Image (cartoon, grey):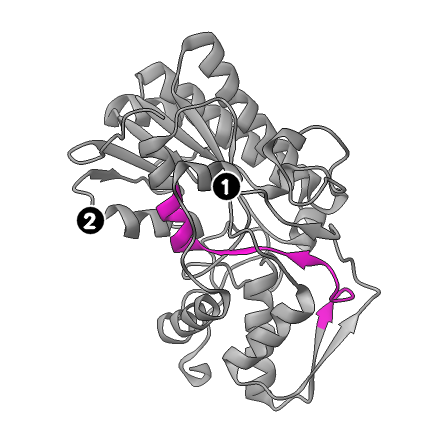
Amino acid sequence: MPTAMRLENKRVYIAGHTGLVGSALVRRLAGEGCDILTVTHRECDLTRQREVEAWMADMKPEYVFLAAAKVGGILANDTYPAQFLYDNLAIATNIIHAAHRVGVKKLLFLGSSCIYPKFAEQPMREETLLTGALEPTNEWYAIAKIAGLKLCQAYRRQYGCDFISAMPTNLYGPGDNFNEHTSHVVPALLRKIHDAKLSGAEEVEVWGTGTPRREFLYVDDLADALLFLMAHYSGESPVNVGTGEDITIRELAEAIARVVGYHGSLRFNAEKPDGTPRKLLDISRIKALGWAATMPLEDGLRATYEWVRTQGGSRGRPGDAASSLVGWSAAHR
C-alpha cells in the first residue's frame, strides 16, 4: 500500500460537483483544508475538448475526482442511447486527457457496477469485467464507463499517470435526481410512494416482478470511500465500492413505504423490465485496504426522504443529468 496522501492545501477539482456524487464529495472535502475547484456547465462544457483543456490549463488542479456523467434509469437509457454514449465518452476522454496534459498528480475516475456482465457470477469481482454480455437496458452508459476505465489504465501504462478507478454499486442520498423520466429506483420509488401517500391512493405500481436483488450505498459513504482510495490506493485495477449486502426490489419498496409512512399496497407490474437479475459487488479488495460503509439502508432512506422534504428543488427535464431534482412543493412537505 502506498504512503497515505493528504489533500490539505492541494488544488482538488471535482468534476460534476452539482450531481449526486459530486455534491457529496464537496461535503466530504469541506473539512480537509483543500482548495476545491468547480466549474459550471455554462463556464465549461465538459463534452467540448477545447473548453476542458483551456479550463484545466488555467486552473491547474493537482487532484481530480471525475464524477461528472449523464445518468439515469432504464427508461432514460432506452430513450436517449446516443446522449448516454456520446456525452459520457466525451466527458471521460476530455478530462482524462486534459489531466495528463496539465500534469495532474492523481485522478480518480468514477465508474459503475453496470459495467459488469449481465450474468456475472455473484458477488461480482473486478476480474469479471469484459467476460460476458452487458445488460441491454443500460449498455450505452456501461460502454462509456468501460471506455473511461480503460483510458485510465492506458494513460497509466503509457505515460505513468497515477489514474485510478472506483466502481460503486447503486447509489442514493441527498442530491439525487427525482425526475420521473430519468431517475433510478430509489428516488423513483420515493417520489411515487410519497405522491401516493399525499393523494390517498390505495396502491402503488412498481416496475417489474420485485424479485431482482440490488445493493444500495448511501452517497456520503461513497464520498468517504473515494477520499480513502485517493489517499491509500494506487493501482491499475478498478476497485469495487459497496456494502456487500443486497435486498430484493420488493424489500426496498416496502422499506421506502415504511419511511414515507404509506400504508397502501404495492402492485408489481411484471410486464415492465426487471433488468439484471442480481447485482452485488465483491468488496473484498476495498475491505482489505481498510474501508467499510457505515450507513444502514433504512437510516439512509430516511435521511434522503427528509432532505427532499425540506430542501425541495427545481423541476428536471427528461434527459437531464443527475443534478436535476423534481420540485416537491411546500404543500408536499
User: Bounds of the magenta span?
Assistant: 206-225
**In the image, residue 259 lies at what x, y percent?**
50, 78
Return the disc, 2 or 1, that comes first in the chain's sequence: 2
Q: Mark 2 = which residue?
A: 31
Q: Please name the amino acid that badge 1 sits on.
A: Ala
Q: CA distance from mark 2 to mark 1?
A: 25 Å
Apparent side of residue 244 relative to residue 77 in the rendered image (left or right):
left
Q: Please name the amino acid that badge 2 sits on.
A: Gly
**In the image, residue 94 lies at what x, y percent?**
46, 25
Was residue 301 drawn as part of the magenta stretch in this picture?
A: no
Was residue 219 drawn as part of the magenta stretch in this picture?
A: yes
Q: What mark, if any, has residue 69 been given in the picture?
A: 1
Q: Which quadrant, please, contains the N terminus?
A: top left
Task: Please give the name of the residue rendered at 69% of the width and 89% of the height, measured from the top-left corner.
Answer: 202
Alpha-carbon neighbours of circle 2 within 10 Å: few (<14), some, or many (≥20)?
few
Under tag 1, what secondary structure?
loop
Eyeballing the image, is 246 above or below 281?
below
